Image (cartoon, grey):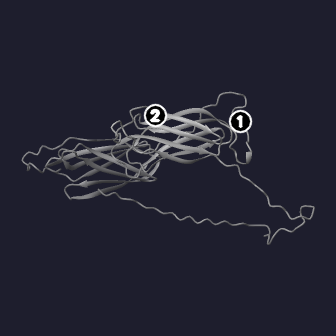
Amino acid sequence: MTRATLLRSTVVLIVIAAAGGDICHGDPPDGINGDDSPLAPREVKRIPQPRVAEWWNSGCKEGADGEPEWGPCEDDDEITLTPDPSSLHVLHENATYNCCPDDIVISLFADGNLLVLTEEEVLTNPCYCICCYDVEATVVDLAPGEYVVEFWWYDYEMGDYRCYVEEVVIPGGGWPDGDEPPVAIDPDGSSVAPSEVKPLPRPRVVEWWNSDCLEDPGDAPDDWWPCEGDDAIELTVEDNTLHVLHTDITYNCCLDEIVIAGIIEEDLVLLTEEEILTNPCDCVCCYEAGATVVDLAPGTYLVVFCWFDYQTGEERCYEEEIVIP
C-alpha cells in the first residue's frame, strides 16, 4: 500500500528596517579613552543556556534468545540521573515505543532551577508492533547548584503520560572561564513546589476494531462474496476526539485483524487501514471497521482515510474537513 505525503513549504520574508537618527560611517576616532589610546573592543560574553546536546536510543533491545524483544518491556521503566560539572546525563531504561520510530527525542524546558525534560517518539511510518528501548540524553551548560528535574514520557502500557521527579546537585568546576554564578533554590530552605509545566498530549489513534464477516454467502460463489454496497466512511467529532467508521469493506475471510494507523501533522490527519494476514483463505467477505483518534487540539483538520479496495484492485482515499471545537 502506498501512502500519500503532503509537502508544504512556507517562504518567510523578513525585512528589518531602522528609522530615525544618523548613520555612523567609518571607524571610531582615537583618543576617546582619555589617555589618547585607541578604544579597546568590548568583550561581551553571553552565559551559555542549558540545552540538550545529544540524545540516543538503543533500538529494539534483544531478549534472552538474542532476538529483538517484540512487545512491551518485561521490567518497569527506570530513570537514572547522573550529574557532572555543568552537565546532567539522563538514562531511561525499559521504555516501550513503536517498533519503527524515526527517532526518540528528549527535549528541555528550563526555568531557573526547574528542568523539564520531555521524551517523545517521532513517527512517520509506524509499524503494527511495539518493543523495548533504552534512551539517553545529555544536558549541558548547567550552572552549579541545585535543580529539580521532571522527566515526562508517554507510557504505552498505561495509555497516559508519566512523570519522574528528582532533585539533583550540579557540582562546580566545569563552568566556562572559571566563573560559577550562584544558583539559589528557595533561599528560605522550603521544598520546591511541583511544576505545572506539562507536555501537550499528542494526537494519536488509541483504539481500532473490526467486525467478523457480516454477510452469509448464501448462494454466492464459495470464493467471492464482496459487500453489496460501496465503501462508506463516516467521521464523527466529539470534544477533542474523532471517531472513524468504515462500512461495506471487502477483505480476506481469514484476516487476523484490520488495523487503522494514523499520522497527525499540524492540520492533516492521515489514516491508513490495512488487513493483517497470517494464514489467508481463498475467499473474501464484508466487514465494518473503526478507530478513535484522541487529543486533537481545537481547529480545522483535513482527514485523509486510505485503504486497499479488493473490488477495484487499487488503493482508495476519502477526504473530509472536520472542525474540533
For the residues labelled 2 and 1, say whether their Cβ atoms are less than 8 Å apart.
no
Q: Amino acid at mark 2?
A: Asp
Q: Is residue 325 visible?
A: no
Residue lying at 56% horizontally and 33% vertically, measured from the top left: 165
Residue lying at 55% horizontally and 41% vertically, measured from the top left: 117
Residue 190 shown left or right of residue 318 in the figure = right
Residue lying at 51% horizontally and 63% vertically, measured from the top left: 10
Q: Residue furthest right?
A: 35
x and y, in percent, of residue 115 in the image: 60, 39
Towards the viewer: 311 or 77: 77
Viewer-side label of 2, 1: 2
x and y, in percent, of residue 65 in the image: 33, 37
Residue 250 shown left or right of residue 203 in the figure = left
Q: Considering the numbered disc 2 on the image, is that residue within a helix, a strand or a loop?
A: loop
Q: Considering the numbered disc 1 on the image, is that residue within a helix, a strand or a loop?
A: loop
Identify the residue position indicated by label 1 in the image: 184
Query: Which quadrant holds the N terminus?
Result: bottom left
- In this rendering, is residue 79 above or below 279? above
Q: Which mark is residue 77?
A: 2
x and y, in percent, of residue 32 in the image: 89, 64
Q: Residue furthest bottom?
A: 26
- In this rendering, is residue 196 above or below 281? above
- In this rendering, is residue 67 above or below 13? above
Q: Quadrant of residue 97?
A: top left
Q: Amino acid at mark 1?
A: Ala
Work out whether mark 2 precedes mark 1 in sequence or the reverse, and give the earlier one. 2
Q: Is residue 143 visible?
A: yes
x and y, in percent, of residue 68 in the image: 35, 42
- The CA distance from mark 2 to mark 1 is 31 Å
